[in-house]
Image (cartoon, helix red, strand yellow):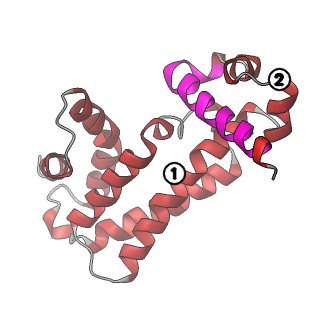
Amino acid sequence: MRADKQRNKEKILKIAEEILTRNNIDTIAIDEIARAAEVTRATLYNHFSSKEELLKEMVLPALKEITEDLKEKNSSGKGDFSSVTDSLFKLYINHQKTLELVSCQTLYGNEEVTASHKAFMEEFNKAMILADAEHFPLGMEMSLKLISATYLSVLLELQKAGKLTYSLFHKIMEGVLTL
């Protein structure tokens, strides 16, 4: 890909991330993204066939990164809860804005995103099993639900409070599981 074409694509992705994470994704038109990125609608469509394709291009790298990270940790066969929270923390640091887009309605039913999310959940489940289920008094299924439900909100609150550290995040997630 030519350098200027690659720059346009990266600029579109960056602007789209800013716009789509601040607004209701379903109400933002592709024209608004093109205007904000200072490219023509044709240029945007040259890179992405639809808003769904644009969103997919933003979300898949985050899902693939966390899946590969967990897969690598799981392959050693020696995991603990600390390694799970470490992976979740790194994912947030690297892909904070795009994580909010994973469950948007526009991507609902997208086969590639669904398959990627499923692969992540399989590795996450394996990691939790390796983390020693006896440390989860509410049981594995409830623990997985609790982590899934609180993960992003805990990190967002820590960031707002100016206390975003791995050790504090880890302690809070441990506390959530021992409720």
> At x 81% / y 53%, what residue is drawn?
1
> At x 77% / y 25%, what residue is drawn?
39
For badge 2, the amino acid type reads Thr
Q: Is residue 77 visible?
A: yes
Q: Which residue is label 1 attached to?
A: 62
Instruction: Give the SS element for disc 2.
Output: loop
Q: Residue furthest bottom?
A: 76
For marks 2 and 1 on the same chain, the one whose residue lies earlier in the sequence: 2
Q: Position of residue 131 (x, y in %)?
A: 24, 70
Q: Which residue is label 2 attached to?
A: 40
Looking at the rendering, the stretch of residues picked out in magenta corresponds to 5-26
> At x 34% / y 39%, what residue is drawn?
152
Vertically, is 61 above or below 8?
below
For badge 1, the amino acid type reads Ala
Q: Is residue 108 visible?
A: no
Instruction: Give the SS element for disc 1.
Output: helix
User: Pointer 2 and pointer 1: residues touching (CB < 8 Å)?
Assistant: no
Q: Position of residue 66 (x, y in %)?
A: 45, 59
Q: Is residue 59 magenta?
A: no
Q: Nearer the viewer, residue 72 or 15?
A: 15
Q: Which mark is residue 152?
A: none
Numbered disc in front, either 2 or 1? 2
Q: Is residue 12 magenta?
A: yes
Q: Position of residue 38 (x, y in %)?
A: 73, 21
Q: Residues within 10 Å of mark 2 (few under 14, many from 20)?
A: some
Q: Nearer the viewer, residue 11 or 168?
A: 11
Vertically, is 151 above or below 130?
above
> At x 25% / y 27%, what residue is drawn?
160
Q: Residues within 10 Å of mark 1 (few under 14, many from 20)?
A: many
Q: Nearer the viewer, residue 137 or 171?
A: 171
Magenta stretch: helix, strand or loop mostly: helix
